[in-house]
Amino acid sequence: MKYDLIIVGAGPSGIFTALELIRKNPRKSILLIEEGSPIEKRRCPKEKTKVCVNCKPYCHITTGFSGAGAFSDGKLSLSPEVGGDLPELIGYEYTQELINYTDNIYLEFGADTKIEGVDAKEEIKEIRRKAIEAGLKLVDCPIRHLGTEKAQDIYFKLEQHLIEKGVEIRFGTQAIDVIVENGEIKGVILTDALKKEKEETVYSDKVVISAGRKGADWLKSICVKHNISHRAGTVDIGVRVEVRNEVMERVNNILYESKLIGYPAPFKDKVRTFCQNPGGFVSQENYDGGLAVVNGHSYKDLKSNNTNLAILCSHNFSHPFNEPIKYGAKVSELLNMLGDGKILVQRYGDILDGKRTWQKELSRSNVIPTLVDAIAGDITSAMPYRTMTNILNFIEALNTVVPGFAGTETLLYAPEVKFYSNKVVLNADFETSVNNLYCLGDSSGWTRGLMMASLMGVRMGQILVNKE
Ligand SMILES: Cc1cc2nc3c(=O)[nH]c(=O)nc-3n(C[C@H](O)[C@H](O)[C@H](O)COP(=O)(O)OP(=O)(O)OC[C@H]3O[C@@H](n4cnc5c(N)ncnc54)[C@H](O)[C@@H]3O)c2cc1C
């Protein structure tokens, strides 16, 4: 079979590529390959079992139509300062233009019209004043909150729309390799994602890989095999912090999400808050090879008593070791080992007292963990000294902005690791060093969020039309 375009991965970046391309040229034959299921069939068994059953061969949280976006909180960050390095490639102002354009598509498909974090100007000034006092930078970022359940509705509508417009979506199908001849892309080799028995080759002169964080490792192996230029990026390692809503109430109401960045002593590494979920739930996602990592999300209507957010530290390496993905995986493995394959949780006060946390201590706290199968234990036994010191010093600084944040009962879950550290070398048309092979979204290492991944897809669609 020969197609006008093959897209590997039906996450936001792949979806918006197909959407924009058929809007501009409805006659195109597009094949969208997705390892997981259609969105209406994606189910995380934890809804019923309450504990993670470690689904095989893949985790339903990260795999299937709409990718890691389906069960995500659906917070669209409407600022070029948030969500990755794409502005370095296409320019800051153009990124803002594309954010507005892509945001309108989300509105067309049913997103909430309310924007968080823009109205209370005086209160925002006060939060910024406290951030400055604590040595932190408050990043301005309007947020459109879809909410986990509404995000699923929107992506379902997008799925139906693509199918109606003739995009062929092959679910349960995994791309295992690409065909490159004389520096040109020729096609993709596929297999059945469950049985992995037969192989099939599909052909196209244009291939887009948008395989997400889940596919980042696979993409790296493809880069090595086919000599596609790539470089090591940064690995972000940290914890998911959970406190009572009462502690975060003011910031939640004014900003919804506080994006704070600091460079705490003594290491002066970049440390930042990420993905804040007022009234949200801490969640677990599993990666190939069995790694369990923590995340968080929040529903539009169903609310918990807690707010969670990530605190992430960037790590760079040089010589003789420069494999950030491997480093992040090793740290996660050690933390998983101490948690018997589950996410570890420890109270902030116990860390300061130099002791592990016990399950019975959690049940008598004000802050009851929303990740019910997290294992009480000792994060400090596995987290690298540098990372742990960065996190503790950052939490102390945050306590100035949010009094009570560094409370003894504050929960720290680990590992929270972001595996987008392989960066594919791209030109401004998102083309790799192989002609007509394009890379998008989180797997490319250039984005780390829904909006940036989506707009990279939109731009990809436009580039492909312009190249005709
Ligand atoms: C729990 C959770 C909450 C989040 N909350 C937010 C949030 O509120 N706001 C925000 O901005 N971001 C959030 N994110 C991050 C956001 O979901 C991602 O940044 C975004 O989905 C990236 O889009 P993508 O298209 O690059 O990749 P993904 O969404 O990861 O999609 C990639 C797709 O490719 C498929 N795939 C991978 N390899 C192959 C292969 N070899 N063959 C076939 N298919 C393959 C995967 O199955 C997957 O469906 C969250 C993530 C998680 C996990």
Image (cartoon, rainbow, N blue to C red):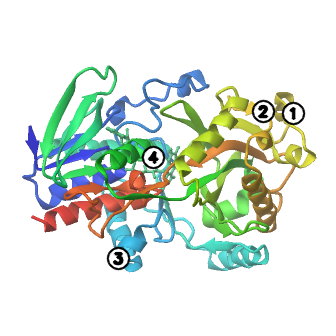
Q: Nearer the viewer, mark 1 or mark 2?
A: 2
Q: Name the residue tied to disc 2.
A: 376
Q: Secondary structure at mark 1?
A: helix
Please name the residue shown 65% across and 30% down the image. 342
Badge 4 or badge 1: first in the primary sequence: 4
Above-or-below relation of 295 to 120:
above
Q: Nearer the viewer, mark 4 or mark 1?
A: 4
Q: Secondary structure at mark 3?
A: helix
Q: Name the residue tied to disc 1.
A: 361
Badge 1 or badge 3: first in the primary sequence: 3
The amino acid type of the residue labelled 3 equals: Tyr
The amino acid type of the residue labelled 1 equals: Glu
Q: Name the residue tied to disc 4.
A: 213
Which quarter of the figure has residue 54?
A: top right
Q: CA distance from mark 2 to mark 3?
A: 46 Å
Please name the residue shown 21% across and 46% down the image. 162
Res 276 seen here: no
Residues 119 and 76: in front is 76
Please name the residue shown 73% across and 57% down the image. 248
Badge 4 or badge 2: first in the primary sequence: 4
Q: CA distance from mark 1 to mark 3?
A: 51 Å
Badge 4: how crowded within 10 Å, few (<14), some, or many (20+)? many
